[in-house]
């Protein structure tokens, strides 16, 4: 946060605005995410609003790249938007399946290990978590090996700090959502940490086992897990 920010004369207003919007959206989503029991902010159909703010956070990250003058940033942002279009179906369905099974759209922890009941939707949520947090093997929008950090290529100082903090907050939010919906939630801090660390361990294992996917490989994967999640959605509705 204390490092000097390099001003880009050719960048638009969004170069400064969008990183702040991304972090604010991720933090707002965190308020509606059950971590220990019920979320801090709860109301009717809060899950729909949660989806909105998580999508807005990801969209804002990529809009930062479009506001930059770097071709690396624009390329990374384009990859991010394409990825979003294909994995958002899987995200929305896998988030709604446990809630519809519970009979509510209010974001809250479920009872029991629903990962065993709805394994396809649970798998989709894990894949989407990797994609939304841009963790390997799905760190496609910011692949250092190809496009020099992608949409954040020209970010420095506080702007870069906002982006990195957003990623950290989104990782906490997404792992907490998975814990609340598919692992039965947690009533104590110790149980919450144990379950979320288990989810993080699974994400780390996938990073070690699988090589980085390119966009042409990731898009069919997102569509595939989206189709799998629809199977569990049909099971719930029937």
Image (cartoon, rainbow, N blue to C red):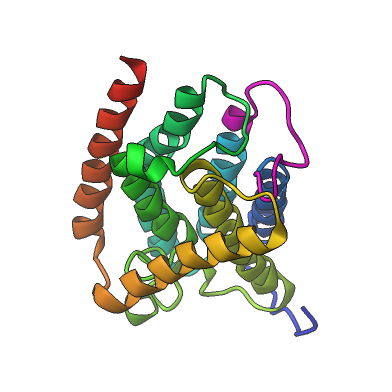
Magenta-drawn stretch contains 36: yes
Question: Which region shows up in magenta?
Answer: 34-49
Query: x, y percentage for residue 194?
Result: 57, 65
| Residue located 51% across and 25% down the image | 102
Camera-side residue: 47 or 53?
A: 47
Q: Is residue 238 left or right of residue 70?
A: left
Camera-side residue: 50 or 94?
A: 94
Q: Main secondary structure of the magenta part?
A: loop
| Residue located 46% across and 44% down the image | 182
* Above or below: residue 149 compared with residue 50: below
| Residue located 49% across and 61% down the image | 133
**Quarter of the view holding residue 223:** top left
In the rendered image, is residue 63 in sight? no
Query: x, y percentage for residue 129?
Result: 44, 55
**Quarter of the view holding residue 148:** bottom left
**Quarter of the view holding residue 47:** top right
* Above or below: residue 20 compared with residue 50: below
In the rendered image, is residue 134 in sight? yes
* Above or below: residue 74 compared with residue 100: below
């Amino acid at each position: 946060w204390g490092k000097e920010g390099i001003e880009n004369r050719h960048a638009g207003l969004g170069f400064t605005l969008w990183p702040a919007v991304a972090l604010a959206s991720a933090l707002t989503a965190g308020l509606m995410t059950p971590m220990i029991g019920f979320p801090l902010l709860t109301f009717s159909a809060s899950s729909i609003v949660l989806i909105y703010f998580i999508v807005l956070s990801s969209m804002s990250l990529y809009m930062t790249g479009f506001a930059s003058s770097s071709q690396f940033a624009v390329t990374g942002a384009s990859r991010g938007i394409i990825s979003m279009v294909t994995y958002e179906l899987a995200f929305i369905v896998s988030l709604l399946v446990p809630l519809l099974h519970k009979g509510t759209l209010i974001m809250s922890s479920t009872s029991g290990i629903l990962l065993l009941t709805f394994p396809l939707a649970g798998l989709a949520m894990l894949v989407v978590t990797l994609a939304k947090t841009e963790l390997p093997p799905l760190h496609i929008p910011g692949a250092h090996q190809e496009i020099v950090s992608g949409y954040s290529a020209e970010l420095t100082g506080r702007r870069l700090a906002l982006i990195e903090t957003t990623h950290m907050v989104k990782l906490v939010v997404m792992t907490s959502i998975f814990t609340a919906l598919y692992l039965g939630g947690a009533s104590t801090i110790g149980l919450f940490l144990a379950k979320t660390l288990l989810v993080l361990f699974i994400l780390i294992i996938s990073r070690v086992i699988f090589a980085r996917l390119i966009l042409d490989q990731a898009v069919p994967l997102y569509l595939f897990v989206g189709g799998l999640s629809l199977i569990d959605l049909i099971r719930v509705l029937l």
